[in-house]
Amino acid sequence: MSALVVRVALPVPIPQVFDYTAENITPGDLGRCVRVPFGRGEKTGLIVALPEDADLPVERLKPVIAIQREAPALPADWLAMVEFTARYYQHPLGEVVAMALPPRLRKADAVAGTEADPLLEATPEGREALHEARRDSRALAILRRLAEQGPRRRSLLREEEGAPAVADALKRGWVAPGAAADAALMDGAPELTAEQQAALEVLSEGFGCFRPFLLAGVTGSGKTEVYLRLVQQAIAQGRQALILVPEIALTPQLEGRVAGRFPSARVVSLHSGLAEGARSQGFVQAMEGRADIVLGTRLSVFTPLPRLGLIVVDEEHDASYKQHEGVRYNARDLAIWRARQCAVPIVLGSATPSLESWHAAETGRYRRVELASRAVAATLPRVRPVDIRREKLQHGVSEHLLRAIGRCLERGEQSLVFLNRRGYAPVLSCPSCGWVSRCPHCTANMVLHLTDRRLRCHHCSHEATIPLACPDCGDQDIQPFGRGTQRLEETLAARFPQARVLRIDRDAARTRAQWEALLDQIGRGEADILVGTQMMAKGHDFPRLTFVGVLNADSSLFAADFRAPERLFQQLMQVGGRAGRGELPGEVMVQTQYPDHPLYKCLEAHDFVRYAALQLEERKQARFPPFAANALLCATAPEVAGALAWLAEARAAALPLAQAFGVQVFDAVPMRMLRLARRERAQLLVEAPGRPALQGFLGAWSRLLWSIRPPRDLRWHLDVDPAEV
DNA sequence: AGCACGCCGACT
DNA sequence: GTCGGCGTGCTC
């Protein structure tokens, strides 16, 4: 019996791992959770290495308290992935592990609570009952479904028929767990179009090796159908498929579609709305190879998958793949790393790919596969800018747009007016003294919300009552300025009193249930005019929606962030894609002061390729990504001076390194939105010719950064490949 | 991040 | 005389 060394990653914000001694260690303990003494107390960490020698003299090591051997150990490839993430994003390993691992998994009860999802089939008694029953019941409906559609997973059946009915059928002995079935079995798959078929053939050549594909398919071209066929092929080979989707309520729709399509497959769905227990359970099922498909938002890129055979990243351009706090990882980029690590194909799908991915396809690093025609409707919507310099606006809406909505109403079809700004008005202001409703904690205005009669800061959630008179001069004539979705809703309701106007924004769809209820309402045709924010832009099909109007698009056109136009173009393409997805043709109008701007010209022509080329040329000239790699060092303090002073020190430490790695370290500057939640912020940009140079530099620099003693009240972090600069 | 130790102001 | 302020330093 010998004492050995284990290296443990602990959830502490220090870029270090800690060595302990332990008895009877086997190689199988690598990747296990472990309870250790730490400082005065105890902590739970993960064994990330079994080194020959400790960094410290062995006599200074403490022994571990207990190793969690009940739960399965995290596999080596998973450890390699979190280690890569920690290194690439310059974040302490223990914190990356703590983020990637469901909290329950660290305790023993998680594994015990793991429940299987049996494949249910009708028993002989059940089949008999189906023939002899006199009165219909929910349990009989289950039997009919099983008779018609074959065995299915309990979770799917619960979804379709309700959990009580399933429990009833099980209790009566009418259904029972059946023999193993082919998980790749597909139910209700539509015929593929010739184009989809061709795409599928190209993509399936990738199986068994690392092959990145960019599936560029216009909205409505049926990308999802292609993913599902690929997933089927992966499952048929006995492999697992990982499908990443953006962080939106898109999941329930796709979740239902996937589960319904593969009634025998074990589908695990992971998203932020999930309870801790369910998340742990899904994680363990995937890790033990008992799940065939994992479908989830960015965090699920960290799901261990021993039989991984395929990764799909849907809407790969979507900004929600990038985490904006804590470990600032990009799940799309990590997915690519993982695909290479596991030697599996990865399909990045989008109608409007990110310029990074598009460039990778242009230069041959990714293989591009196109779906150019719509699978459902024959034509793309007609898009045109409405020149608001030449038009009288009524409460911000042009007569052109209003008439189009009117025509839509007459035809009994739905229209959507898109305005990316919630609330009634973005600011309340006093015309006589110039007072504006500023947030006391942020460099931002408090937004007027009339529905609940509050002023609210959209950045820090600070709330206040609406003053009756100007707090500065007492003038009672304070006015809302500008327009948000609530005011637009009011305007449209006044103009079209006969129409049912429905607002869909984060205020109206606060919970998942509210959001789904709204979607149902729209689907049932219980709304004529929809008023929505960017929530509405994303992948939902409304067959009766034929007109989309866009307000206030210009604000992103000349924004300081170089990615703003890219996002605007993507958003407008997406929102335009909402129009006319059924049998009915669609129309899109964009209100603008710059109808001749190339962005709108490309949009009119549905020409993503030309827009991408224009943008990439601009990025090349300006040395922006993908022609450079960036990182931001951000600091916050009660006063901006403190943040700037620390950043200046950090910059001084960087300069000798910068030269060696060929990177440029710019001066520290206060952030555009200086104050956020009572703290002032500043940042410093690092620009490198490429990722290797950036990584080399950051590795050396961050060691120095940790050694600069920051003042007590200062916090800093590095953001590698930031979404906004 | 916690949680100690460590030296200087207003209190039972 | 001590309770407690948060500055500095460490955690295998």
Image (spheres, coloured by chain):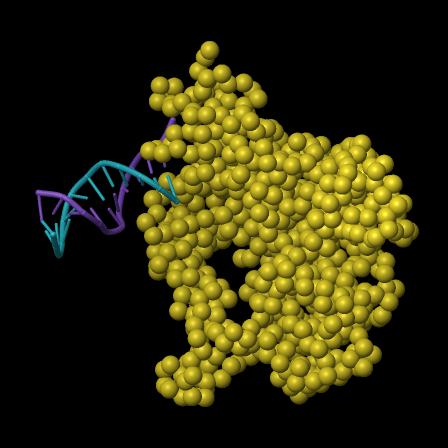
Chain colours: A yellow, B cyan, C purple
A592 with respect to A715 (left or right): right
- Left or right of A256, for residue A303: left
Where is residue A250, by image quadrant? bottom right
- Percent position (x, y) of residue A142? 80, 47
Whether residue A76 is visible, yes or no, is: yes
Residue that sits furthest to the front in the current view: A134
Which residue lies at the image location 71% right of the left edge and 32% below the top edge?
Answer: A307
Left/right placement of residue A717 relative to residue A143 reads left
Compared with residue A385, is residue A21 higher up or lower down, i.e. above or below? above
Of A273 and A679, which appears nearest the observer? A273
Q: Which quadrant is the C terminus of chain A positioned in?
A: bottom right
Outermost residue on the top side: it is: A1
Estimate the x, y position of residue A364 in percent, counting from the top left: 75, 45
Front in this rendered view, residue A320 or B12: B12
Residue depicted at x 57% and y 55%: A723
Q: Residue at x 71, y 38 (%)?
A: A117
Q: Residue at x 56, y 36 (%)?
A: A110
- The answer to whether residue A261 is above or below residue A27 is below
Q: Is residue A15 left or right of residue A598?
A: left
User: Does residue A48 show up?
Assistant: no
In the image, residue A126 above or below residue C4: above
* Residue placed most toward the observer, A471 or A396: A471
**Residue A215, how many percent across, how many down?**
77, 50
Task: Pick whichever, A576 or A107, lies toward us.
Answer: A107
